[in-house]
Structures are given as structure tokens and as C-alpha cells.
Image (cartoon, rainbow, N blue to C red):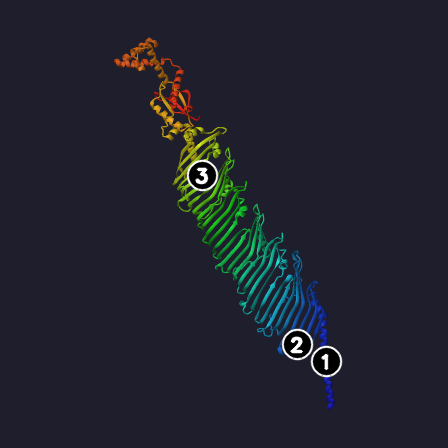
């Protein structure tokens, strides 16, 4: 029995061994051969059915059923459209099946993907090559099922040398992006207890053109999910991803790289604690160009954001430093007025429309301790003006401290730059963004303002050829008040008339030190305004148009249509200094061109104000042409000159020859010599002008009279006004009401001068008499008794006064007209002839007048000349009328004389002889003074009418020989 049992035991053991061996062999065969066969031959068909045509293939498959290690080589899956989708060079999967016994979980020792490649394509219709996946969805709703945590442990998951290929052919573009190699590692993942984990993960991928993504972390727990780690990214060449959008955008990123990195911490149970720390962002050698003409629009040497921290759930961002190096921006405005960058931004916004912001959402809180911009520049070209303008900022630096989301926090700002390679600007300020306020200091050195000339060219012919501005000032801005304090220098300014390129004005330097400007008071207060080398050119053309009056290109309606609002501008200047200045005045509207030059003008004006009533004191001196002098002295109220003005303007030693064009135009004569001295006094009190003007002309020499004649007998006027020393001294008082809108000072002056000339022409003796204190009504004629040429004593006095006048007016001559009165002189001469007839009749009588004749003598002569009956009747009538003898004799004798005088013969020659005798008597008396011979001219006698009773006035006339 024992033997039987022993044999039975042996047989059972062999059977068991054989069974086990057979099972192991079967298991091994199935594992080593069946699984690979299944994967290579059965799975592709199943995949084809499940994916509606997807093509799955494995070149080589191997499975070790004892180590549970699966290896696949060259795994490929193509879409139902036979397009590449997923490819894998090697796949390795290893499970430790026995570990479940003591760990209670499936333990995956290793999962490995080697060189996986995913291909994503988007065709010209915008469809992706994985669109077919959407058609496999099961739209039936699934019941919610509670799932237990998967009892799984993964010791190591690895993805090596993976890649992603993306192609896009929409909108006619051909865009390709390759990402790889991609690496991903995941270690120590235990899904049994989600609250306690010590897993590690790393994803690393390179992007074409040198970029990469490096994502690493440590998983502390899966439930709740707690993880921390770091992320690093580098874009490689920015052109590659940017090229995807290039067809939609007008600009291109030609060069540059970008990257960022941070440490992170995430807890799904406490999302608010999520934070990104040690965040940095960097960009290097970025260059943006225009697609249209390929010129550079933007360049950035480097950008660094360091020390940043982000709490995304709390919307908090803080950074220590943002540094930008070598930023260069180029902008251009076309002839049509379009700025290229504004057009680019508009097109970008159209390509990527932004969503409407929800103002109810909590805004981000942010802060950057310091922002620095170094060695940067801005270039702007403007083609809107007729002349292209280029404006460049370089060597630009900016530093902003304390920038944050709270607009009420003060920021410190410093800024400096070079402008157009010549001038500089520096700014140091404190800024509060809301409510906006700022204070600080600004320095501008040598700013060339001629760059603005093309912008003012459309409105004026005045062209700023050159001119520099320098400013050192402290400023303070608040919404309610702006104040600027400092000093200004305007150096080397020249303003030309663009029509002929002539100089209008300019100066070497204008210094304002110090000044204060306040707005909205609109007041400028200047302690000292110093002007050096000021020059202006005043020119009147042939059409009598002043060059300054036609500088504006706008019509009167356009220029006067704008009404300024706010307070009028007010100016207060304590002291104005003028040094080394000059002016040129020319007038081409005259018969001869005129030009004069004022030079070496200097002086001071103290206390200028347009805001308050103060007395301004003026003292200016300057040369006129070669030897002349101009002076202005006095005071005035600059706020209201009509209220008070007391100025004296003097011109000394001016060469009259230079003013020939004006004398020829207005007086009709050239001037070949002489000096002019003017003392002009302007006194205005409450609008009432009382001007005391004195004109002194020395040694004037008149030249030719203009063609067509002069409106004035100027030689006579000169002879009347010029004394024996060759000096004309005239007082021209001017009075008027300057508040009267019809009052024109120049018109009043010419009116006074015209009155003087008129008086000289029409009443020369009256003018001379008034100038010398002589009764002008008497000296214009010499009176004689009727029928006589004897000079009476009163007339001798008048002749002596005329002698004085002639002595003081050496250029003047005197025409002496002998005259007779047809009535009085005829009566007187006939009376004299009657007396002579009586003497001839009786030579023994002694008579010299008709009154001395006896009645008997008269009757005797009457009987010879009158009718006897007429004489008898006359005698009887007088006897009856005058019975008393004496009365009869007196009246009867007078009647006889009146009857006899008309009967005496008298010729016209006798009257003319009397006139000649009278003029000769006048001339002979005046010739007692030596040198008068050639200045006394006897004129023919002339009949006179309406003479004074008993006196015959012979006329005298002042002339220029």
C-alpha cells in the first residue's frame, strides 16, 4: 500500500508539475506571443471601427508576462482622413503585480514614452485634423456615479524627446510651429491616500528657434491638491509664434526673444493662498518692423521684471523692479495726417477685439517699486507741414518710483533726454495721479525752436529761422492752480519774412531772471528782463504797405473769430534792460527810396505793469545813422497810458539830406543839407493831451523842386522861419482828447504843420511879427497921406521894424509896391493943382492949401471956369441960406472949391508917378542898412481901392530872391 501510495504521490506531483508547467507555458506563450499579436493585428481593427476609419499600427510589440513589461516600437495613428496624428517611437509599460499584495494598490513601476510626436493641422477651411473626434461623442446623459479613489501607485512616468508639429493653412497662410524635444517626468504618485503625497513632476520642452518650457513641481497632496514648484519659459525667436498672426497684422516681430519664470504654490482647498513668487519676465533684442516698408518701428535691447509676486485669486501684483534698456520707438505722420502707430493699433484692435470690461469685477491691485528706462529714444517724422519735420529724443532715461494702483500715492519721477542731438531736458518731480497734482523742477538747455516753424508756416509769412530756448524752473500743478518759477533764456533768434527771406527781427539773447507765472490768474511777474542785441527791420513797400502788417496769411474774419476765455494776460516787469540793439526802417513808397538805421540802442524801463496803476520810468538812448542821437526819457502808466503819460522824445543832429525822400513826397523839394533836432513832449493827464513839441532845423539847404511843383512855397517858408544864424526854431503845441475815437495824433501833427505853412504863405508878416513880438497887423504896408509921398513918423517906426526882420532873415527879400488911390489921391492932387493955379494967378499971395484962398480969388477963378448964371445963382442961394457974413463966406468958399477941384486937369501918369515916388521913399529909407540893396525890389505902381480914410497903404511883399 505504501508503495502504491508513494507511486500515487509521485504521479500527483508530476501531474501538478506538468499542469503548472503547462499553465506557465501557456501563460508564457500567450504573454510573449499572444499579447503582441493581439496588439499588432487585432487592436488596429478595433481602433478602425471605434474611430470610423482611424489607422493604428505597431511595427514591433513585446510583452514579458512575468515582469509585466510591455514594449511597443514605432506606434502610429493616422486620422480617418489618412493624416498624421500621433506617432511614438517607443512605448514602455511595467507593472509590479505582486506589490498589490502588501500595498493594496496597482504599482506602476515605469511608464515611458520615447519620441512621441503629435501632428495638428488646420486646413484652409479652418477645420482641425482632430475634428473627427467630435463625431465620436456619446451625447446620452450619464448618471452621476460616486467614484472611489483609484488604488494606483505610479513610481515613475517619463516622456522623452517628444514633439508637437502644428500647421495652419487658414486664410491663405502657411504657418508651421514645431515644439520639441518635450520631456515630462512624474514620480511617486500614490492615489490610495490623496491627502498625503510626495510626488515629483517635471515637464521640459524645447521650442523651435531656441525656445523651451520647463515646468517642475512637487505634489504634496492630491486631495486637496497641493503642489509647489517652478516654471521657466523662453520663447526662442519671437518671429516664429508671431508669424502665425502676421497676415492679420500690419506689423511684424522681426527679432527678439522673451521669457518668464516663477515659483508657484497651489492648494485647491485654499485658492486665495495661490501665489506666484520670484516672478521674472525678460525680453531681449526685440525688433518690430512695418510690413509695408520693412522699416524699424520699435526696438528693445532688454526688458527685465524682477522680484515680482502675484496672488491671482486676490488680484494682487507686486514687483521690485522693471527695467527697460535701449527702447527706440519710431513714429511717422503722413501727408494725410495719419500717424502710423495709431493705424497699427486700430488694425490690431480689429483683429483681436477686446471684450467689454465688467466694471463690477474687483480690479487688480498692483505696485512696482521702481521703473527704469535707460538709453532709449523716440523718433518722429511729420510730413503734414510743407517741409518735413524730424523730431528725435535720444539718450533718454526715466525713473519712476512708487508706482501702484492707488492713484493717490505720490510717485517720484526723474526724466532726462537729449533733443535732436543738441539740446537737453531734465525733469525731477513728484506726481499724484488722482486728483492729478505734481511739483518739481524742469531744466531745458538749448532747445531749437526753429523746428516748429513748419507748423506756423500755414498761418504767417514770419519764419523762425533759428532760436534756442533754455529754461530752469520749479513748477507746481494742482487742478485749481499752476505756478512756474525760474528763469528763461531765448538765445540767437532770427525771424525772417519767407516771401523775400529778409530779416524781420532777431536778438542775441533775452534773459528773464527770475520770473513767476501763475494760472488761472494768467499773471507773469518778471524781476529783470534783459534784451541784448535786439534788431528789427521795418519796411514799407512801393504800395505803402508795412511788412509787419501783411505777415498773417489768414483773413481778418479768421484771425478775429476766436475769443479768448478766462482772465486776460497780465504782465509785471520790475526792470527791463535793453543793450546793443538796433533797427532799420526803409520806405520804398516815396519818390526816392528812404532808409535809416538806429543803432547802439540801450537803456532801461523800470516798473512795467499791465495789472496795476504804477509809474513806469523810461530811459533809452540810441544812435541814428552816422552822427544822430535818439533819446526817450520820462514816465507813464503802462496799464493805462491815456491816464498818465509824461514822455520826452528827442532826436539830435539828424542829417536832413537822408530825409529827402519824405521832403520830396510831402513838401515837394529835395534837401541837400542841414541838421534836424526834435524835442517832442507827450503829456497826457486823464486822456487830455498837452504836447509841447520843438523843431529845430539848422543850415537847411533846399534842392530841386519835384516835377509838377510843390504844394508849398517852401523856399519862402524857410526864408520866413530861418534866422540869421541859419536856424529854424519852431514850437508845435499839440492838444487833444486821446479818449476820443476820432483823435489821431499823426493827423493832428500834420494839421498843426499845415496851419503853420498856410500862415507863412498867406500872412508872412503876421507870422514873423508873432515870432518877434511885433504887431503883425501894421508892418505889411506903409501908409501915406493922400497925394503925398512923404514918410510919416509912425511909418518910420514900421520901417525900422521891417529892418529888424530883414536883418534876422537873411534869405528873405522885400518887394515894395508903389500904389495910388484913384479917389483920394486924385482929389488931393487936383486940390494941389487948384492951389498952384491960384498962385500962378497972383504970385503975391502966400497960400499952400485951398482953405487959405479968399472968396474973391475963388470967384475970380470960378468966373473963368463956370457959367455966369450958375455962379450968380450959387452965390444968391448961399446968401439967403447964411445971412451972417462969416458963415456965408465960409460955406460959399467951400462950395466954390468943390466946384473948381474936379475941373483941374490930372493924368494917369501923374498918379503912377506918385506911386513910384512912394516906393522909392520906402526903399531909400531901408537902404540905410548896409547889405539891403539887393534885397529891396521896387515893383510897378498899382491902383488901390477901399483905402483907409486920408491914408494910402502901399503894399510890401516878402519874397525869396
Q: Secondary structure at mark 3?
A: strand
Residue visible at 62% across and 61% down in the picture? 236
The numbered mark, 3 or 2, whose residue comes first in the sequence reads 2
- How many labels, in total? 3
Disc sitting over residue 203 in the figure: none
- Quarter of the figure that contains the N terminus: bottom right
Give the image location of residue 134, x and y in percent. Answer: 65, 64
Q: Are marks 3 and 2 in contact (CB under 8 Å)?
A: no
How packed is label 1: few (under 14 Cα within 10 Å), some, or many (20 or more)? some
Instruction: Answer left or right for 169 relative to 365.
Output: right
Q: Nearer the viewer, residue 803 or 553?
A: 803
Q: Which residue is mark 1?
A: 21
Locate residue 770: give its quadrant: top left
Q: Against 207, is 456 above or below?
A: above
Q: CA distance from mark 1 to mark 3?
A: 139 Å
Instruction: Answer left or right for 363 relative to 170.
Output: left
Q: Are marks 1 and 3 in contact (CB under 8 Å)?
A: no
- Quarter of the figure that contains the C terminus: top left
Q: Secondary structure at mark 1?
A: helix
Q: Which residue is mark 3?
A: 629
How packed is label 3: few (under 14 Cα within 10 Å), some, or many (20 or more)? many
Q: Which residue is mark 2?
A: 97
The numbered mark, 1 or 2, whose residue comes first in the sequence reads 1
Give the image location of residue 275, x and y in percent. Answer: 55, 66
Q: CA distance from mark 1 to mark 2?
A: 20 Å
The numbered mark, 1 or 3, whose residue comes first in the sequence reads 1
Give the image location of residue 384, x and y in percent. Answer: 57, 47
Q: Nearer the viewer, residue 403 or 197?
A: 403
Mark nearest the camera among 1 and 3 is 3
Amino acid at each position: 500500500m505504501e508503495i502504491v501510495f508513494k507511486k500515487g504521490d509521485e504521479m500527483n506531483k508530476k501531474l501538478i508539475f506538468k499542469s503548472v508547467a503547462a499553465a506557465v507555458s501557456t501563460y508564457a506563450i500567450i504573454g510573449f506571443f499572444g499579447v503582441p499579436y493581439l496588439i499588432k493585428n487585432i487592436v488596429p481593427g478595433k481602433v478602425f471601427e471605434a474611430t470610423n476609419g482611424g489607422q493604428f499600427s505597431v511595427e514591433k510589440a513585446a510583452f514579458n508576462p512575468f515582469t509585466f513589461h510591455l514594449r511597443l516600437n514605432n506606434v502610429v495613428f493616422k486620422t480617418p482622413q489618412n493624416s498624421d496624428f500621433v506617432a511614438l517611437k517607443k512605448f514602455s509599460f511595467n507593472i509590479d503585480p505582486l506589490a498589490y499584495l502588501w500595498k493594496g494598490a496597482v504599482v506602476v513601476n515605469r511608464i515611458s514614452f520615447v519620441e512621441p510626436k503629435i501632428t495638428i493641422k488646420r486646413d484652409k477651411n479652418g477645420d482641425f485634423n482632430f475634428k473627427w473626434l467630435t463625431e465620436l461623442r456619446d451625447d446620452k446623459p450619464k448618471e452621476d456615479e460616486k467614484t472611489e479613489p483609484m488604488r494606483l501607485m505610479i513610481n515613475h512616468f517619463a516622456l522623452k524627446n517628444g514633439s508637437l508639429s502644428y500647421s495652419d493653412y487658414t486664410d491663405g497662410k502657411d504657418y508651421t510651429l514645431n515644439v520639441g524635444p518635450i520631456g515630462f517626468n512624474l514620480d511617486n504618485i500614490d492615489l490610495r491616500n490623496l491627502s498625503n503625497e510626495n510626488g515629483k513632476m517635471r515637464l521640459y520642452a524645447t521650442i523651435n528657434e531656441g525656445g523651451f518650457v520647463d515646468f517642475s513641481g512637487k505634489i504634496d497632496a492630491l486631495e486637496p491638491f497641493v503642489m509647489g514648484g517652478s516654471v521657466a519659459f523662453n520663447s526662442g525667436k519671437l518671429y516664429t509664434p508671431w508669424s502665425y498672426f502676421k497676415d492679420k497684422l500690419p506689423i511684424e516681430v522681426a527679432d527678439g526673444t522673451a521669457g518668464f519664470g516663477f515659483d508657484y504654490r497651489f492648494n485647491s482647498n485654499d485658492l486665495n493662498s495661490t501665489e506666484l513668487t520670484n516672478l521674472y519676465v525678460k525680453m531681449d533684442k526685440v525688433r518690430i518692423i512695418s510690413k509695408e516698408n520693412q522699416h524699424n518701428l520699435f526696438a528693445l535691447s532688454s526688458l527685465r521684471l524682477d522680484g515680482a509676486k502675484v496672488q491671482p485669486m486676490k488680484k494682487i501684483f507686486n514687483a521690485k523692479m522693471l527695467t527697460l534698456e535701449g527702447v527706440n520707438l519710431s513714429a511717422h505722420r503722413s501727408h494725410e495726417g495719419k500717424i502710423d502707430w495709431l493705424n497699427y493699433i486700430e488694425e490690431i484692435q480689429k483683429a483681436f477685439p477686446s471684450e467689454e470690461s465688467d466694471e463690477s469685477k474687483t480690479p487688480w491691485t498692483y505696485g512696482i517699486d521702481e521703473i527704469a528706462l535707460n538709453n532709449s529714444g523716440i523718433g518722429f517724422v511729420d510730413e503734414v507741414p510743407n517741409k518735413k519735420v524730424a523730431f528725435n529724443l535720444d539718450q533718454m532715461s526715466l525713473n519712476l518710483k512708487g508706482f501702484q494702483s492707488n492713484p493717490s500715492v505720490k510717485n517720484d519721477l526723474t526724466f532726462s533726454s537729449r533733443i535732436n542731438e543738441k539740446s537737453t531736458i531734465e525733469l525731477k518731480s513728484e506726481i499724484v495721479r488722482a486728483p492729478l497734482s505734481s511739483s518739481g523742477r524742469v531744466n531745458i538747455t538749448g532747445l531749437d525752436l526753429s523746428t516748429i516753424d513748419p507748423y506756423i508756416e500755414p498761418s504767417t509769412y514770419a519764419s523762425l529761422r533759428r532760436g534756442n530756448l533754455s529754461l530752469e524752473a520749479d513748477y507746481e500743478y494742482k487742478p485749481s492752480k499752476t505756478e512756474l518759477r525760474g528763469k528763461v533764456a531765448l538765445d540767437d533768434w532770427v525771424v525772417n519774412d519767407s516771401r523775400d527771406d529778409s530779416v524781420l527781427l532777431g536778438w542775441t539773447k533775452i534773459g528773464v531772471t527770475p520770473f513767476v507765472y501763475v494760472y488761472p490768474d494768467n499773471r507773469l511777474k518778471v524781476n529783470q528782463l534783459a534784451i541784448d542785441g535786439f534788431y528789427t527791420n521795418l519796411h514799407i513797400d512801393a504800395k505803402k504797405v508795412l511788412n509787419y502788417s501783411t505777415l498773417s496769411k489768414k483773413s481778418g474774419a479768421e484771425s478775429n473769430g476766436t475769443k479768448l476765455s478766462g482772465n486776460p494776460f497780465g504782465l509785471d516787469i520790475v526792470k527791463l534792460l535793453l543793450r546793443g540793439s538796433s533797427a532799420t526802417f526803409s520806405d520804398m513808397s516815396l519818390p526816392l527810396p528812404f532808409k535809416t538805421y538806429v543803432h547802439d540802442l540801450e537803456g532801461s524801463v523800470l516798473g512795467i505793469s499791465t495789472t496795476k496803476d504804477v509809474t513806469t520810468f523810461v530811459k533809452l538812448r540810441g544812435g541814428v545813422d552816422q552822427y544822430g542821437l535818439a533819446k526817450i526819457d520820462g514816465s507813464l502808466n503802462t496799464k493805462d497810458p491815456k491816464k498818465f503819460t509824461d514822455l520826452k522824445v528827442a532826436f539830435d543832429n539828424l542829417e536832413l539830406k537822408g530825409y529827402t525822400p519824405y521832403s520830396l513826397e510831402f513838401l515837394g523839394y529835395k534837401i541837400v543839407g542841414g541838421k534836424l533836432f526834435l524835442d517832442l513832449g507827450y503829456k497826457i493827464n486823464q486822456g487830455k493831451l498837452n504836447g509841447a513839441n520843438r523843431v529845430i532845423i539848422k543850415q537847411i539847404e533846399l534842392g530841386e523842386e519835384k516835377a509838377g511843383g510843390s504844394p508849398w512855397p517852401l523856399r519862402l517858408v524857410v526864408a520866413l522861419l530861418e534866422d540869421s544864424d541859419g536856424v529854424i526854431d519852431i514850437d508845435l503845441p499839440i492838444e487833444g482828447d486821446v479818449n476820443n475815437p476820432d483823435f489821431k495824433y499823426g493827423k493832428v501833427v500834420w494839421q498843426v504843420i499845415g496851419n503853420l505853412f498856410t500862415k507863412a504863405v498867406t500872412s508872412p508878416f503876421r507870422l514873423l511879427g508873432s515870432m518877434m513880438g511885433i504887431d503883425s497887423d501894421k508892418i505889411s504896408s506903409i501908409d501915406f497921406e493922400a497925394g503925398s509921398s512923404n514918410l510919416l513918423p509912425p511909418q518910420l517906426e514900421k520901417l525900422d521894424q521891417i529892418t529888424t526882420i530883414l536883418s534876422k532873415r537873411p534869405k528873405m527879400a522885400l518887394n515894395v509896391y508903389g500904389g495910388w488911390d484913384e479917389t483920394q489921391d486924385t482929389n488931393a492932387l487936383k486940390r494941389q493943382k487948384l492951389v498952384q493955379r491960384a498962385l500962378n494967378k497972383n504970385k503975391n499971395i502966400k497960400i499952400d492949401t485951398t482953405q487959405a484962398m479968399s472968396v474973391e480969388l475963388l470967384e475970380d477963378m470960378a468966373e473963368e471956369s463956370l457959367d455966369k448964371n450958375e455962379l450968380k445963382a450959387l452965390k444968391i442961394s448961399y446968401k439967403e441960406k447964411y445971412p451972417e457974413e462969416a458963415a456965408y463966406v465960409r460955406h460959399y468958399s467951400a462950395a466954390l472949391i468943390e466946384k473948381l477941384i474936379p475941373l483941374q486937369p490930372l493924368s494917369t501918369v501923374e498918379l503912377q508917378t506918385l506911386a513910384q515916388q512912394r516906393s522909392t521913399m520906402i526903399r531909400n529909407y531901408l537902404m540905410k542898412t548896409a547889405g539891403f540893396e539887393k534885397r529891396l525890389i521896387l515893383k510897378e505902381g498899382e491902383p488901390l481901392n477901399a483905402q483907409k480914410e486920408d491914408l494910402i497903404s502901399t503894399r510890401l511883399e516878402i519874397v525869396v530872391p
